[in-house]
Image (cartoon, helix red, strand yellow):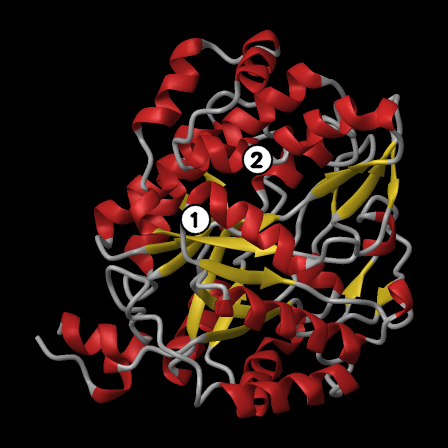
Amino acid sequence: MKLPHSMDEPRFMFATGIECSNPTIGPARTRVDELELCGHYRHWRTDLALLDDLGIRHLRYGPPIHRIWLGPDRYDWEFTDLVFAELLRMNVVPIVDLCHFGVPDWIGDFQNDDFPRLFAGYARAFTQRFPWVQLYTPVNEMYICAQFSALEGLWNEQLTGDRPFVTALKHIVKANVLAMHAIVGERPDAIFVQSESSEQYHPESPEAARAAGKLNAMRFLSLDLNYGRRVSSEMYTYLMDSGMAREEYDFFMENTLKQHCIMGSDYYSTNEHWVAPDGTLRPSGEIFGYAVIARDYHDRYRLPVMHAETNLREGDGGDSTVQWLHKQWANVLRVRAEGIPVLGFTWYSLTDQVDWDSRLVTMAGHVQPVGLYDLDRQIRQVGTAFRRLVSDWARVLPTQSVCLQVPVLSPRTYVALAG
């Protein structure tokens, strides 16, 4: 069947996102709900209308899992029904984050052995509820979620150590894989954007080379398991010594849906680190930059790429937000010129964020001025620059069609084809 003209020529995915992180913190397991803190529950209609102002049609969006998923096969879709009806009316293509750093209270945390199986049921229910949605990030930044929850002890289970980290990681990645299978079972042309933090560790001395090498191997673990890529002998020993069973590892090697995936690479000025001989880290700022690191990840997985997150607070790293925007875009163009299929670019997020200066550990109400709009929904200078960038480049970039097995269908196109 010939698609409508607008979908015969799929567009480069210029996108933004609604900040939707929702981990729990502290002894009382207090929920940090960025949708609440950033005012989205109150201003969601305004937030979606701003997409027209920017001239974009792709949105990274995470429905609030802790409010929707009330128990096994129990859901409250009221708010999500309203938002997704408006996205459909606007013909916006959402990239749906089903799990963004937190789970409902009744699940507990990422140490729960039942989480992967239960989460697949949630993913299936979501797909049945919104069959026109094609693009998903089942679990956002799997490596960072496990690291912050079970290695650094900041969120959710608030544990530290290799064994709880590997437990969280294997559960998170298995949940992602099972969710992909559940979604494809309902929507065979589903596409998954594996939004993952693109990290780089630099040894600060020769004595730190070994520690940096281990960290540079660990950063790939979530995607290696997700894409069924065999890990190095060092990482295999690490996983086995830290509680992963051989049959658990074999599951990942045998159940990949890599052919449905776009590798989402997130890059901030905080993604590169100096490593001391004892393994401690300190910020390095931008050394290699996005183009070098994205090429490393692409060389490893050989998948189409989307620059799925970036931002900068004014004054961070010596750059203005506008300069950072143009620097990231120049890196995207460089990567594309080298023959790597980059299908999208995202400024994250639409509005300013709250308390990310403490990595959400301290609920102090500190506003981080990183959005395209402030929390009063007034456009920032970077928002004006992003709007101009989209207008200038959207009409001249090559299409996605040579990079994907199936086109990214607009919501209205899919509804029309589905009858």
Residue at (30%, 26%) from the top-left corner?
Answer: 254
Residue at image point 62% right, 60% down: 291
Residue 285 image point, x, y percent: 84, 54
Look at 28% across and 86% down and name the residue there. 6
Report the number of numbered marks.
Answer: 2
Q: Secondary structure at mark 1?
A: strand
Name the residue located 38 percent from the left edge and 12 percent from the top edge.
Answer: 247
Q: Is residue 402 left or right of residue 114?
A: left
For the C terminus, which image quadrant? Answer: bottom left
Q: Position of 125 compared to 137: left or right? A: left
Query: In the figure, residue 397 lies in which quadrant?
Result: bottom left
Q: Which of these two is toward me, 95 or 306?
A: 306
Give x and y (percent) for residue 71.
47, 37
The reply to whether residue 20 is in sight is no
Amino acid beneath label 1: Tyr
Q: Secondary structure at mark 2?
A: loop
With 19 as the anchor, is 77 left or right in this view? left
**189 in relation to 415, above or below:** above
Q: Nearer the viewer, residue 285 or 155?
A: 285
Residue 220's label in the rendered image is 2
Residues tagged 1 and 2 counted as in contact (Cβ below 8 A): no
Residue 23: percent from left, percent from top? 69, 43
Q: Quadrant of the N terminus?
A: bottom left
| Mark drawn on residue 75 | 1
Q: Which residue type does callout 2 highlight?
A: Phe
